[in-house]
């Protein structure tokens, strides 16, 4: 199937390539021009209109537009960009000649440059400007919130072949936790954080996510529910936003093969083409298929990902973007080990004798997942100051088969557990934003006003089956759980046949006001109405747990640009919340749990983008946490508190041509400040290491006979962390230092490379005590066209 889809895509692209560039007759004239930013960088995807003929086109990757086959006469070229006044350029066409109509931005417009694409020579590892972060035309140095970006150029150089590897370049992300169905979770500021955002809206995926369709990953730090809500922001530590690849105005693409350790085989493709003569309709198709065995005694993964994307400039004011992500996988679950916690002692996973290379399962204990994400966005330029953005996002993830865990029964025995059956997750997000960039007197004002509707539906039809315990320190060589054993024990399992659904209705506003050209303040608020339908038990037809809740969150900040566009000081005070169900012993219903963050720091982008980074201190205080009521142990009370504070630092440097450094450091101090006596004052289990470091340096020969030859080296460090942390029992995860290296040769028409991950085969575990890969060798060859 994959082969035929690839051949169809290439044939479709070539067919349109030939028809798109058909020329007019020999007596026709041509109009061409180039659109550039204030610093002379070409702007792609700018809408250009030949007014008299009502013909539209878009600038290409070099900022150039062309109208061919134009009869001699006087014409007007209209340049239309959001955040810019429309510009009319008169032009005279002479038969058989080419007329020029260039346009150069006379002032900086981050709105225009975000709507278009800047195709310049700026360090590709520094991609800090994003409309998704604040939903406003804000540069990184103007934004009082901290965020990091990982560009495709960086994770392509590092040969990241799975989504978890992308987090290596995010300060404080740590070892990714891979759930049984392939879903990835990282750390952020002491909280587990899932990648639930896709292009700035809800895009949860309860399955493997292939990086083949990623343009970049944006990591927004701190509580972020004011703009994004609880359906995207999965923790108070922030959120991970997946920005997908979009069509561009030109024909091109790449086909790549990667092979490596444990029968790793991966084939990817990326094809892009205009599909009409005016170049206003663009199509891009990304895809990948991957197969790999596990380094352990059994285990494998086989995935297919397809991601078509279509954009259409309907008029010079109205544009449509439509893209789809489809992925399916068949695999065995990764090891999830839940140690025995009744021994009242401190022990490390590295010394308790649990085997690093053994799963206690077989290759027929598998799950199958399927993910389908559909995203549509309609942009309309209302005026030179206001734009409308309408978004529809639909996501579906299904899991069928077996997901597993190994539960400790004593210090030396485990009982395998298998959850067998079907699970389905469906979410719909409808969002309408109005974005303004205008002046009140002499003061610049940037505003987003939005409404958001989110519907979530979950369906469970599965059984949990527990098997007899076995010794893991001295395992029986023939002991393995098989599918036939699961089928035989299914009727004795604990059934879960239920559905649940919820609806969220929200409105929000965010405003950035320039008190002076260098000093700005941000004020934002959100009101969120949550309705939970409850759990419908299919067996009994009973509905339980329905409730309604209303929450308010705020976000405020201040930025002072000490050196405009180069150095800024910032501070923020932000709030996040999560809905809570239930009631206390006195009958009072619980309210949403809240967290407030106070943060301040410095951002810089110096020496013509050769040195960029952020350093900040944050203090997050969580309140209204549920904990056991000591006077009524069957109830909870809502007076718990938690603290998470620390320092983060990230740096991107280009000291001289061809040499790049990406580095980060995160220190986090988390602890329960009012909690049950068993954990009072302790660091929460599952909060990750308190100190983490990431580093990557690469050099690419910039000129001469060896131009394109490069090497890269880097690594990640994490201090000791906890899987369990109570006053009586502690399961520790040892510190780690993992080193990677690559060598490559990158040319305009091809790229070859070799990568070694975890050079020293450092033993590492995720927070679910999943053993990580030892040294892994990968080679790649890519053809570009």
Image: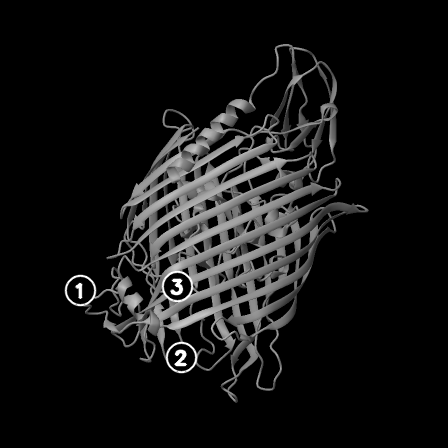
Q: Report the Cα–Cα distance between label 3 and label 1.
A: 28 Å
Q: Report the Cα–Cα distance between label 1 and label 2.
A: 36 Å
- Circle nearer the N terminus (1, 2): 1
Residue 89 at x, y percent in the picture: 73, 25
Residue 420 at x, y percent in the picture: 37, 65
Mark 3 or 1: the one toward you? 3
**Which residue is at the front of the view, 47 or 725?**
47
Q: Mark 1 Cα within 10 Å, few/some/many (few <14, many 20+)?
A: few
Q: Compared to 248, does 232 lie above or below?
A: below
Q: Quadrant of residue 488?
A: bottom left
Query: Residue 202 shows which numbered tag?
Result: none
Say if residue 173 shows up in the picture. Answer: no
* Circles 3 and 1 in contact, beta carbons < 8 Å: no
Q: Mark 2 Cα within 10 Å, few/some/many (few <14, many 20+)?
A: some
Q: Is residue 231 left or right of residue 333?
A: right
- Circle nearer the N terminus (3, 1): 3
Write down the residue under mark 1: 477
Question: Helix, strand or loop at disc 2?
Answer: loop
- Circle nearer the N terminus (3, 2): 3
Q: In which quarter of the image is residue 384?
A: top right
Query: Residue 421 shows which numbered tag?
Result: 3
Write down the residue under mark 2: 727
**Which residue is at the front of the view, 365 or 295?**
365
Q: Compared to 537, does 371 lie above or below?
A: above
């Amino acid at each position: 199937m994959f082969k035929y889809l690839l051949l169809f895509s290439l044939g479709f692209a070539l067919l349109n390539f030939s028809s798109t560039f058909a020329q007019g007759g020999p007596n026709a004239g041509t109009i061409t021009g180039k659109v550039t930013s204030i610093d002379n960088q070409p702007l792609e995807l700018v809408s250009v209109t030949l007014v008299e003929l009502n013909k539209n086109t878009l600038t290409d990757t070099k900022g150039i537009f062309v109208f061919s086959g134009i009869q001699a006469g006087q014409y007007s070229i209209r340049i239309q960009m959001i955040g810019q006044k429309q510009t009319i350029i008169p032009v005279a066409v002479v038969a058989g000649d080419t007329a020029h109509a260039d346009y150069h931005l006379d002032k900086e417009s981050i709105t225009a440059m975000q709507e278009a694409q800047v195709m310049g020579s700026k360090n590709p590892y520094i991609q800090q400007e994003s409309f998704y972060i604040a939903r406003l035309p804000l540069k990184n140095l103007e934004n009082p919130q901290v965020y990091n970006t990982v560009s495709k150029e960086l994770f392509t150089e590092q040969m990241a072949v799975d989504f978890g590897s992308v987090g290596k370049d995010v300060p404080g992300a740590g070892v990714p936790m891979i759930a049984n169905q392939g879903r990835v979770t990282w750390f952020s500021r002491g909280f587990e954080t899932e990648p639930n955002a896709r292009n700035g809206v809800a895009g949860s995926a309860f399955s493997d996510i292939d990086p083949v369709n990623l343009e970049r990953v944006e990591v927004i730090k701190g509580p972020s529910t004011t703009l994004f809500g609880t359906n995207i922001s999965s923790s108070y530590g922030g959120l991970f936003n997946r920005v997908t690849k979009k069509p561009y105005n030109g024909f091109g693409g790449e086909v790549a093969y990667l092979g490596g350790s444990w029968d790793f085989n991966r084939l990817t493709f990326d094809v892009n083409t205009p599909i009409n003569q005016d170049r206003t309709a663009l199509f891009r198709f990304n895809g990948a298929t991957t197969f790999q065995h596990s380094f352990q005694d059994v285990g494998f993964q086989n995935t297919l990902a397809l991601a078509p994307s279509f954009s259409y400039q309907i008029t010079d004011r109205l544009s449509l973007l439509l893209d789809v992500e489809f992925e399916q996988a068949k695999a065995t679950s990764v090891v999830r080990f839940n140690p025995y916690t009744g021994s009242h002692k401190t022990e490390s996973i590295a010394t308790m004798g649990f085997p690093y290379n053994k799963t206690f399962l077989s290759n027929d204990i598998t799950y199958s997942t399927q993910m389908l994400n559909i995203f549509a966005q309609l942009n309309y330029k209302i005026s030179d100051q206001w734009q409308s953005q309408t978004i529809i996002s639909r996501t579906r993830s299904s899991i069928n088969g077996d997901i597993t865990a190994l539960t400790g029964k004593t210090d030396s025995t485990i009982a395998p557990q298998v959850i067998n059956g079907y699970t389905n997750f469906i979410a719909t997000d409808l969002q309408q934003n109005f974005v303004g960039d205008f002046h009140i007197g002499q003061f610049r004002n940037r505003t987003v006003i939005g409404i958001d509707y989110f519907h979530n539906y979950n369906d469970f039809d599965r059984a949990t089956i527990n098997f007899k315990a076995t010794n893991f320190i001295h395992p029986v060589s023939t002991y393995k759980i098989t599918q036939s054993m699961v089928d035989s024990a299914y009727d004795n399992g604990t059934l879960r046949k239920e559905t649940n659904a919820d609806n969220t209705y929200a409105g929000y506003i965010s405003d950035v006001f320039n008190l002076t050209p260098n000093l700005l303040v941000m004020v934002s608020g959100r009101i969120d109405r949550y309705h939970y339908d409850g759990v419908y038990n299919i067996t009994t037809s009973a509905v339980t747990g329905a409730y309604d809740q209303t929450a308010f969150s705020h976000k405020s900040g201040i930025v002072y640009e000490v050196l405009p566009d180069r150095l800024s000081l910032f501070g923020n005070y932000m709030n996040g919340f999560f809905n809570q169900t239930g009631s206390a012993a006195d009958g009072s219903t619980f309210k949403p749990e809240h967290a407030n963050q106070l943060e301040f720091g410095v951002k810089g982008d110096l020496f013509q983008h050769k040195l960029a980074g952020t350093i900040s201190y944050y203090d997050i205080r969580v309140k209204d946490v549920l904990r056991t009521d000591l006077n009524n142990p069957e109830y909870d009370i809502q007076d718990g508190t938690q603290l998470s504070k620390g320092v983060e630092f990230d740096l991107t440097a280009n000291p001289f041509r061809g040499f790049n450094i990406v580095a980060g450091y995160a220190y986090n101090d988390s602890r329960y400040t009012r909690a049950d006596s068993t954990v009072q004052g302790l660091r929460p289990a599952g909060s990750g290491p308190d100190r983490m470091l990431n580093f990557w340096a690469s050099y690419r020969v910039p000129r001469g006979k060896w131009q394109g030859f490069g090497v890269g080296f880097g690594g990640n460090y994490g201090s000791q962390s906890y899987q369990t942390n109570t006053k009586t029992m502690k399961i520790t995860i040892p510190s780690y230092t993992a080193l990677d290296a690559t060598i490559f040769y990158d040319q305009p028409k091809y790229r070859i490379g070799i990568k070694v991950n975890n050079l020293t085969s450092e033993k590492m575990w995720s927070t679910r005590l999943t053993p990580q890969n030892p040294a892994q060798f990968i080679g790649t060859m890519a053809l570009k066209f």
